[in-house]
Amino acid sequence: MIGIHRGGAVVADRIERELAQQHHILRGNLDISFYRDDLDTIAPNPEVRPSELPFDINGKTIWLIDDVLYTGRTIRAAMGELFDYGRPAAIRLAVLVDRGGRELPIHADAVGLTTRADPRMHVELMHDGAWRVAQRQVKS
């Protein structure tokens, strides 16, 4: 199971806590900052975190975990980085929220909530593990 920084890593942590009592989970995180196709348009100094894949992904079924699936570009970037680490047998995708609005032919295999909410919608993850769908505040 591999969480995509930032929100996906938090969701993957929560899933791991739930499953670890009954299953051995190989767990990692990806930072896709340098694999994004919009790197030149985001903030001048993006926050980069290390990718952590402490296991060999070759021949394994990998579950990518993210908080929100929207255009599909984040997942495309994550798959690009994954293939730099090896050749998994399969890649599956689990997301907390699917917002629709796909620009690429990517779908989730497991979805917590499907919505066609306002584009400012995001997921807020609380310290107690709870989550809620909220709208970003627009700065004027």
Image (cartoon, rainbow, N blue to C red):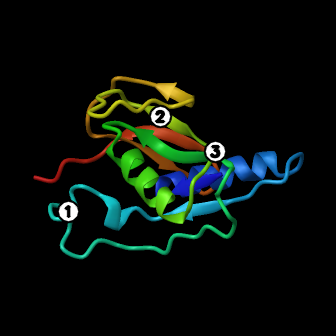
Kindly state the secondary structure of the residue where label 1 is placed.
loop
Mark 1–mark 3 Cα distance, whole angstroms, equals 33 Å
Residue 116 locus on image (x, y percent): 34, 23
Kindly state the secondary structure of the residue where label 3 is placed.
loop
Kindly state the secondary structure of the residue where label 2 is placed.
strand
For residue 95, side relative to residue 137 (left or right): right
Mark 1–mark 2 Cα distance, whole angstroms, equals 23 Å
Dots 1, 3 in contact, CB < 8 A? no
Point out the residue furthest to the left here: 140
Dots 2, 3 in contact, CB < 8 A? no
Residue 13 locus on image (x, y percent): 66, 56
Question: Which mark is first along the chain, 3 or 1?
Answer: 1
Q: Residues within 10 Å of mark 2 (few under 14, many from 20)?
A: many
Mark 2–mark 3 Cα distance, whole angstroms, equals 25 Å
For residue 70, side relative to residue 90 (left or right): left
Residue 67 locus on image (x, y percent): 49, 45
List the residue tagged with mark 3.
Answer: 89
Vertical placement of 9 versus 116: above or below? below
Name the residue at 45% across, 51% down.
79
The label number, if any, that marks residue 97 in the structure image: 2
Vertical placement of 103 versus 59: above or below? above
The label number, if any, that marks residue 42 in the structure image: 1
Vertical placement of 30 versus 93: above or below? below
Please indicate, yes or no, whether residue 5 appears anywhere in the rendered image: no
Amino acid, disc 3: Ala
For residue 66, side relative to residue 128 (left or right): left
